[in-house]
Amino acid sequence: MVAHIINIGDEILIGQIINTNGTFLSKSLNSIGFNVSKIISISDKKEEIIDCIDRSRKDSDLIIITGGLGPTNDDVTKHTLTSYFEDKLVWNYEIKKHIEDLFKKFVSTPIIQMNREQALLPSKAKIYKNIYGTASGMWFSEKDVDVISLPGVPYEMKSLMENSIIPDLKVKFNRPYIYNKTLLTYGLGESAIADRIADWENKLPKNLKFAYLPSLGRVRLRLSSTGGNMVLVKDEVEKQLDDLKKLINDIYVGEENDGSIEFHIAKILTNNFKTLSIAESCTGGLISSIMTSIPGASKFFKGGVVAYSNEIKSSILKISNKMIKKEGVVSSKIAELMALNIKKIYKSDFSIATTGNAGPTIGDLKSKLGHVYVAIASPKGVFVEFYKMGNHRERVIKKTTNKALEMLFKHLKSVKDYNFE
Amino acid sequence: MVAHIINIGDEILIGQIINTNGTFLSKSLNSIGFNVSKIISISDKKEEIIDCIDRSRKDSDLIIITGGLGPTNDDVTKHTLTSYFEDKLVWNYEIKKHIEDLFKKFVSTPIIQMNREQALLPSKAKIYKNIYGTASGMWFSEKDVDVISLPGVPYEMKSLMENSIIPDLKVKFNRPYIYNKTLLTYGLGESAIADRIADWENKLPKNLKFAYLPSLGRVRLRLSSTGGNMVLVKDEVEKQLDDLKKLINDIYVGEENDGSIEFHIAKILTNNFKTLSIAESCTGGLISSIMTSIPGASKFFKGGVVAYSNEIKSSILKISNKMIKKEGVVSSKIAELMALNIKKIYKSDFSIATTGNAGPTIGDLKSKLGHVYVAIASPKGVFVEFYKMGNHRERVIKKTTNKALEMLFKHLKSVKDYNFE
């Protein structure tokens, strides 16, 4: 079953709003076994809408349209669909009463005729009441295609989809079963992973689809399949993933639904009553702010120091100016001392420290652009890693943050005698 | 001049990622006078890409394509375009060297043939070097249409657009002159602003377009106009904005191109050789990380303390446990002391401090969910403000961060005898 999504609205085409409706609809439709082959944004013009539906009905079984259902003159979707399907508008008295009720309860301005006329609806379409708004959903069933029109306001559209449209789609369409799972990895680039798992990937049965989704040193690997038999489809994906996991054991974080690295770290620390502190130079507070963003962070996160100047590294983190001068502020030794000292000062079990040169200019630092040291201190001691993070300031900061979290995660997972998990 | 945008990638069609590339490109193209009439997302399939270009070239002068340029087998855009335009791939040695350099400088794994082959590029296309990545931009010029292919990674695509494609589009296409300017405001909601400026807005000439762009307590106001005469279009927009500025003087930050509040703060501090430090409780490092994200931050930003636990507020920020117990950790007094003490300890001219309850649970804090205190210390003394930030953790943290930066900005602007600008 192939679906197309059409999002109507000038605000999308001028780049004023991000088309999150397209994302929500494609996710919803995929989850019930539709194959969304096209998402199209067009403007509020009658000819464009008709042309777009005409083309899409040739390639799809289902078209979902959002937007253009407001009461004002610039909203043309309802009239366009009504004439396109050679239908006429008739009063829907249940909807009329609903609109009048909404105005009474929630709107401070009095209702006007323009609002009431939103209850003038096409006679052939199945009408769906929008509990949050005055624009109804409409479902036109033709022999070759089903066309559903929904309001463009995201929470109104979502509510109609979840409560009415999805259940009805499940009844009407005989869909294949679909199953997909995404694995999180870290520390290895897309092409290096591809190289490593080439044999596995080449041997994948043709009906399985595999994709790499890279972002800042973390690559998500997604495998999906569809078929008539739920058990077979699921088993096939899981069996292949078991084989894949063996090949990527050292870079594997977990399944996407279990949360990203910071959630795994938070879970391990909280479950074991261990604490964390963070001393940040080049990452400037980003690691702390990510750990803080996790609900319940106060259970394991003691806090941190943003030691952006050498002065603070010396006064707060107790690293002597002599040592900074001797080693250079971007050095393995300084990262190590930052981690050890923040751990001691904040009385935490674990700590993270970063020092590096994020650019854009080298400034007065002796280090090279993008050169970064990350240290992890633990009850076992301290270790430091060196990275080259590129020449883009924002990315140096974000990649260093990701690397630091990965190092801590890997350490927490690897050291068996912490008695974790 | 009509443009179509085609975003290639299964991850968009299954709803895994939001298509922000479409938004960025439509905004960029509109800003230089293109009319974007369609944004289309399709999958990584050769036939689909060809079909989509074939249809779009009938209705448009320019097609920009993103995605599908990676080195792996699921990326087919380069090969598809090369065969569609009856071209062949040839080695581009400058790009080959660039790819090898990127690997040498920034990648820890060795380069493999798959990466080098990204320098195999269509002979007829103009090639654009991607300084942040290995996938080049390509521009095919045909009689009836120009087709530009860019990488799907957002920051790589953005950099290519801003530095190369937009300038070249301006040269090649004869577009109507378009002028728009966006003003940044803070501290007042969208409808309150609309109410205040209703008279001004109603009197706007019909050819000018005005839009509100709200986000977390900051509203951007954009006015735009198009026409054949550069001077007239620009003058009309600027004249209207001068009138608007008089109405919003108390909530006005500056023009969008001059940067957001943090950039204004950075500029004022740097120009006056003043420094800043930050003590964060509920914002957990986010304010520090925003200030650090500004290039040249080391000139004015001394650093900060993330005092997530009472223990740290006492040991590092020197606030007695007795005081915390007496006042409550989320209180005006504690915010004040945090600001005064971090300023003293970090020897800075100004400081920011936050303490609040971001939720989701009240925990052992006596304060109410979403209640927040923000303090600013300066050479003049210290002042504190209290806010209710709602019950959504992420939004409490972000709104508090915005408020804190606004308070400091307002203070820096208002106090004339700092001799600042």
Image (cartoon, coloured by chain):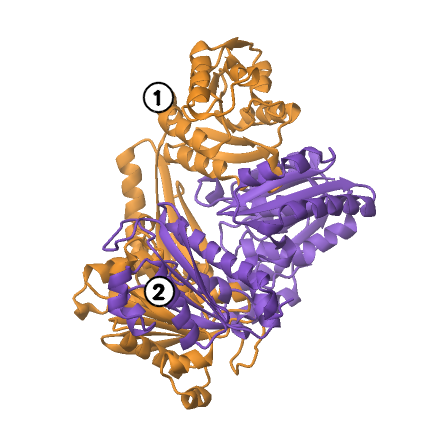
Chain colours: A orange, B purple
Please tell me how crowded label 2 is: few (under 14), some (14-19), or many (20+) other residues with Cα within 10 Å. many
In the image, taking residue B231 as reference, residue B71 lies left or right, namely left
Q: Is residue A1 above or below residue A84?
A: below
Picture residue at 36% right of the left edge, 30% below the top: A176
Q: CA distance from mark 2 to mark 1?
A: 45 Å
Q: Secondary structure at mark 1?
A: helix
The chain to which mark 2 is attached is A
Counting from the top left corner in percent of width and height, residue B170 is at 75, 51
Picture residue at 54% right of the left edge, 15% below the top: A117
Q: Nearer the viewer, residue A213 or B44?
A: A213
Type of amino acid under label 1: Val
Q: Nearer the viewer, residue A253 or B389?
A: B389
Is residue B89 visible to us here?
Answer: no
In the image, taking residue B63 as reference, residue A363 lies left or right, namely left
Please tell me how crowded label 1 is: few (under 14), some (14-19), or many (20+) other residues with Cα within 10 Å. few
What residue is disc 2 on? A406
For the N terminus of chain A, the image quarter is top left
Q: Nearer the viewer, residue B157 or B247?
A: B247
Counting from the top left corner in percent of width and height, residue A246 is at 29, 58
Picture residue at 61% right of the left edge, 65% below the top: B416
Q: Is residue A24 above or below residue B291?
A: above
Mark 2 against mark 1, which lies toward the viewer?
2
Q: Earlier in the sequence, mark 2 or mark 1?
A: 1
For the C terminus of chain A, the image quarter is bottom left
What residue is disc 1 on? A171
Q: Nearer the viewer, residue B20 or B72?
A: B20
